[in-house]
Amino acid sequence: MNLFLGIDFGTSGARSVVIDTLGGVHAEGVCTWKESLVTMESPKLWKNGLFELLNQIPKDLCSQIRSIAINGTSATVLLCDEMGNPVTAPLAYNHSCDQAIVERLKAIAPPDNPVLSSTSSLVKLLWWQENLTPPPPGKLYFLHQADWLGFLLHDKLGISDHHNSLKLGYDVVNLCYQSWLLEAIKWGGKFTPILPKVLTPGTCISPINRQLSDRFRLRPDCIIRAGTTDSIAAFIASGASSPGEAVTSLGSTLVLKLLSPTAINVAKYGIYSHRFGDLWLTGGASNTGGAILRHFFSDRQLESLSRQINPNTPTLLDYYPLLQPGDRFPINDPNLLPRLEPRPSNDVEFLHGLLNAIARIESQGYQLLQNLGASPLQRVYTAGGGAKNSTWTTIRHHHLRVPVLPSPHTQAAYGTACLAMRGELIKKSSC
Ligand code: ADP
């Protein structure tokens, strides 16, 4: 049998899924570590986690695994020496650098480029260039978390994919680093890092390193493929693949992703687009979502109260549920006030108002994407903690007016296993 391994790395844990050519799951693994902060120790934890996951796979399956891909947390980055050893602690996806660097970048980066954020990979790199004193000696390689973990498997230092590299400023339309970016990394002056060679996610990089194939009884011809980011891996897991298909993630926040033939980038709404095969994966994230539901109710209360709501009757409560002021998408207003009043004495009515408001914001989000040129919405898959709430699904269906379905698979590791299998979103496999 031909099997394919996907590995999903977060900051405090990693998961693996082994699938066959029909998408059937043959093995799953998990590895967590206590330290969720990213420190100098993190790469060691990630490496041990990777090997622990390979060790967990039943040996009879290992010999059938044809290819492996890894996804990492978007914009978690490392600086490494020529041997691939990190020379400083990685910077985590949510590490916010000096806003002054963003302001300087605004003078040369294209407007609406995803690098124009204090957490972008490029801003982290420029921060290192300014603040690592004395600069580490020798050649330095800039990598994302998934690139570095892939390197441990294939030994080729300095390779990335264009999902991870979007926030580094890689031009995913023309598939190159533009001159403004090369200019920007000369500013730092103290050292000039080697930027990764960027491949299409799923591209064959090389067979697995021989030592590791012996150690984990993997096939010596098991191919390591270019990876992706965690949220795109979760999108791939849904199976959505046509224009107009979307995935809403109802986790702590509300995240929308919509496939479209056109790319949309509007920084003020935090909207940017990833190349996804021949299409573009566009989307945005609102600060509303499950966190505010959890603020008022336990998961158990959410279940029992939701059962008592009639989703086919309207609610007159007009909320904008936020834990603190400010939203970016679909309304760009850093001072937007939460609207949570009047609060009825009956919790069933209150929750109905909250669920309805989040559904309305979801619908406004998809409307905004379409107004900016995305494909008309055809179908919405749902992931995250709110996906299991059938009352909410009905309310959302009233707002969205297209089929609303649970995602058949929601795990990022599953999506990355699909990437390992298809070697696609590329048209032709390069192997
Ligand atoms: P994240 O990964 O962003 O932390 P999850 O996908 O684990 O989030 O989802 C957790 C969220 O799901 C919580 O904020 C919780 O309020 C919400 N949630 C859990 N159960 C329900 C339910 N039955 N109905 C609606 N929301 C729910």
Image (spheres, helix red, strand yellow):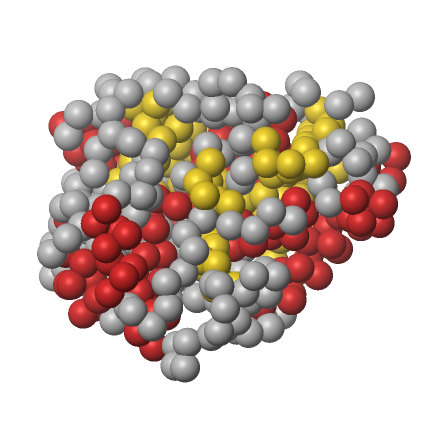
Q: Residue 135 at what x, y percent from top left?
A: 41, 76
| Nearer to us in this view, 339 or 291 | 291
Q: Residue at x 61, y 61 (%)?
A: 83
Q: Is residue 322 above or below residue 303?
A: below
Q: Residue at the right extreme?
A: 60
Q: Residue at x 43, y 66 (%)?
A: 91
Q: Is residue 80 above or below residue 250?
A: below
Number of disc labels:
0
Q: Quadrant of the C terminus?
A: top right
* Residue 206 on image: x %, y %: 64, 36
Q: Is residue 371 visible?
A: yes
In this rendering, position of residue 368 left or right of residue 121: left
Tell me if 12 is positioned left or right of 208 in this view: left
Identify the residue at horizontal 58%, vertical 43% (top origin).
70
User: Residue 290: x percent and y percent?
Assistant: 38, 51
Q: Quadrant of residue 107?
A: bottom left
Q: Can residue 306 be seen in the rendering of this structure? A: no
Tell me: 318 left or right of 301.
Answer: left
27 to 299, vertically: above or below: above
Q: Could you tell me which quadrant the N terminus lies in?
A: top right
Question: Which of 399/117 is in front?
Answer: 117
**x and y percent of residue 42 in the render?**
58, 68
Single out the residue that lies furthest toward the bottom: 134
**Quadrant in the rendering for residue 402:** top left
Q: Residue at x 75, y 23 (%)?
A: 2
Please say if 422 is above or below 37.
Answer: above
Residue 343 is drawn in which quadrant? bottom left
